[in-house]
Image (cartoon, rainbow, N blue to C red):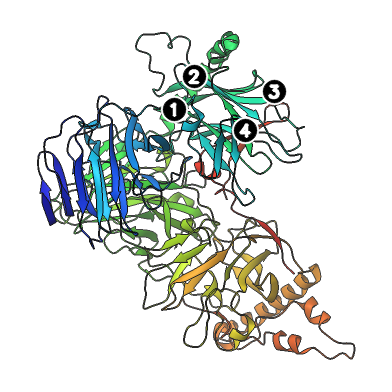
Amino acid sequence: MILANGHMYGSKFRCAGDIIFDDVDISPGQICNVQLKPFSETCNFLQYQKPLSPEKPYFFAQIRTLAYNSKITLGIAGPDIASDSHPGNWLNSVGYHSNTGRCYTSHQCVANTEGEKFGIGDVFGVLVTYFGEQKSTVIFLKNGSPVATRFLFGGDHSRYLPTISLENGPIDLGLMWPEAAMGVPQYSEKNMLHWIRPLSVKYDVMTNMFIYAGEEKLTGELIIQSPHPLAGDIQHFEVIIQEMVPNCPGPSISLATCSPMIPSPSSTLAQDYLRFDLDNNVDSMVGHKIGWGIHYNPEERNRPDFNPKGEQLVYCYITANMEIIAGQMMMQPEGGFYPVVLLRDGASKVTIDVESNPKPIGHNQLLDERFKAEVSQAKKGLQNDLVNKEVKESMLRKSQDVEVTITNQFCRLRLTADKIGIHVVQFNKPLTEDSNFFLLCIRALNEDSGVGLGVAGKDFPPNKYPGKFRPSVGWTSKDGKLYRNMRHDGNLSGERFQEGDMVGCEMEAFASEMSVALFTKNMRPVATAYYTQSNKAEFLPTIALCANGHDVVIDVYWQNMMRGAPIFSVVNLEHWCLPPGSVVDHSTNTVHVKDHSAPISIQAPYSLHKGYNHFEIRLTKDFGPDCPPPAVVLSTATPLDPPPNSCLKLDFLRFWAVNEASTLVQVGDLVGWGLLYIDNTLHHDEEQLVICYLTVNHKILLVRVVYQPPGGFYPLVVLPPDLNEVTLEFSATIIKQHPITSSDVDILVREATVLMQKEKEIIQAGGDPSTELAGAALFRSLPSAEAMNQDASGNTSELANRYRGGTVKDKTVEKSGKTNKMSTTITESSTKGKKLKRVPSKKSLRGDSKSSRSCIVL
């Protein structure tokens, strides 16, 4: 049956686009042909309407034909997924992309297992390995071997529909739907070839070792994961250390969830990831064994209906040469904890053993005693968590037309189609530094309807979108704009959100006079905006709904119902605020943006601070009067309101290599901004005097003393029209050594103090300092550098003359008058110099938490 640019909703299939497929009754062993026409570029959709089940949990595709730019997504989704969406890029769905090897669940691709590409000749399958009450586990198989695992969120198994999307034909597939698949693939954690690993890690059958086999020096960490969780017959695994270089940490081992939980649970007993690291200073342990194990409740595990993969309290413990050295109670997630091993430079060879001690019988009594000793305290902690995350309707200030349903996980808000106007719901608990993020899952939202989210005070009107009242800040679905105090100007334009998306609001920086909100879409940053409120009791999560003839349904995770905001890395460009449709090339740290007729910006998710005090770009393209390069900017979160009346308080500092400034740099140069804090007693989010310095190839060219705005200066790169890419460099995000002497600081601060006095005098006389002092020399080279450039006769060198006293004018570095998070390390005395690390996020597994790197500037 050919379905061209149409839709079909039949008893067996739902289809949209240019897909040709066999619409027949499915019988065991039957392969159905699925084809995409040549030159069909947009997303084409096919969904089998009979759900996967414990009896029929598997389907697969044979890849027969692909174009060079074809994209296949195989996955599972509900019947409400939009026909132009890929499974995995929608709430409560999961999908795997052929062209990148990336695997998504509810929009997220961060996990222990990253996948690999598949193409012509491959057989690729999707298997539900555990059907849970709130979430299930899925494994993806390439030619019968596991390549990735992910959670599939949502406990309604009738929505587990096999779903594929195709782009850029021609594509020819042979699909074997669940009723046709005869049995499921068999794989075992005892077979090391079935462990999921990066392509650069090889398993040597002769030596029984996993070995890093990449051509380049190993940087970061490489992850090897079992295809099965610990459960049943295998409740403990060990790693035999085969390489450990002196003064380098050995391999790490962990217990991890199938993929990160979304959102992160509020309880400290429910973690994505438990990790054990060896200290750098321990003696060589080659040949020694380290391991992780789980121990079930002795009063439950022998019952006939006991489910070893169900959500339950378990005792997680670490062994060293089969001696238990540490342990703690944890809540095992549905599907169980997966064994994970991490390789790094100096520890790039390991042997994994799951058969020698799968159930440490000799420690059974000791483990029973530890479980019984700690289970009461763990249950008390879970009970306290339930109390802390409780939400009652009385805690909401809301329109009476908004229906509220509260569960243990979320708060559902529904506005029916017949309700007219804007309806506001406000949570009466303010956001705090310890609890600073709330999340919306958009379940039903027509394009004519609207949702807004943000932060406002108790006097916020019941019929406004947050941001469209002073003081408040917010983001709206219909136009995608960010508003604060009724304004929506700024460096970042925002983007629309719709049904199937997750959107969040985090108070990222709390300062005395104003704070910074960071808005996220599908757990990636979108934009920042100021909230001009000093009273922290007025930081109330605020949501607005507008039906406009269609039901609106959202699930809200208030700040007390989950652990916290997503953690971003400033050295991962996908974690920057990017224009919609941008593509990141991680191999070169380059952002490619769509064609644009006006300047567009990319911005770091976090401002510069004491742990991240420098950023830079590399000029990779020829530039000139007709094709200017990117501008490198230190910017406020949004333009200050009201505009400051001072040359020391700015919305941004910009270096743009045009006109005279174009002679200062050339193609291939690194250009960046750094920040030096003068008063170390102040928090880096507060307004304070700082020294901003411009670097070219890690040499300081110019400096200027300004007031850092509340929330800090954000790294920003502006791309002029016709420039569609920019490359960033992350080798120098912390400057620990620099040529700025204490004498330099004294001179620069003294000059700034003189400028302050001049501004005060101008204001007293009724003038405008930013106008009257605009031509003053506000940028200069370092005083110590100027002294060194003077020759023996007392004359100043040409270079010093050029930059001394701010001779680089505003056209070069312009101002406009209007316009940290790491894992917790737990050290126990019984570990004997080793560390047990509990990490709430997989980002640290991928090195994303290493947000900064040290460098020296000259």
Q: Look at the numbered disc 4 and give the secondary structure of its residue.
A: strand
Could you tell me how far apart the alpha carbons at marks 3 and 2 are, in whole angstroms?
A: 25 Å
Q: Give 856 or 241, whichever is nearer the viewer.
A: 241
Label drawn at residue 234: 2
> Does 792 sit above or below residue 644?
below
In which image quadrant can residue 355 be found?
A: top right
User: Mark 2–mark 4 contact, CB under 8 Å?
Assistant: no
> Does 727 sit above or below residue 364?
below
Amino acid type at mark 2: Ile
Who's the residue at 63% across and 26% down the image? 290
Give the image location of residue 140, x and y in percent: 37, 38
Q: Which residue lies under the disc numbered 3?
A: 830
User: Mark 3–mark 2 contact, CB under 8 Å?
Assistant: no
| Label 4 neighbour load within 10 Å: few <14, some 14-19, many 20+ | many
Give the mark, 1 or 4, whose residue is nearer the N terminus.
1
Q: Give 522 or 619, whichever is nearer the viewer.
A: 619
Q: Look at the numbered disc 1 and give the secondary structure of its residue.
A: loop
Q: Which residue lies under the disc numbered 4?
A: 350
Q: Which residue lies under the disc numbered 1?
A: 228
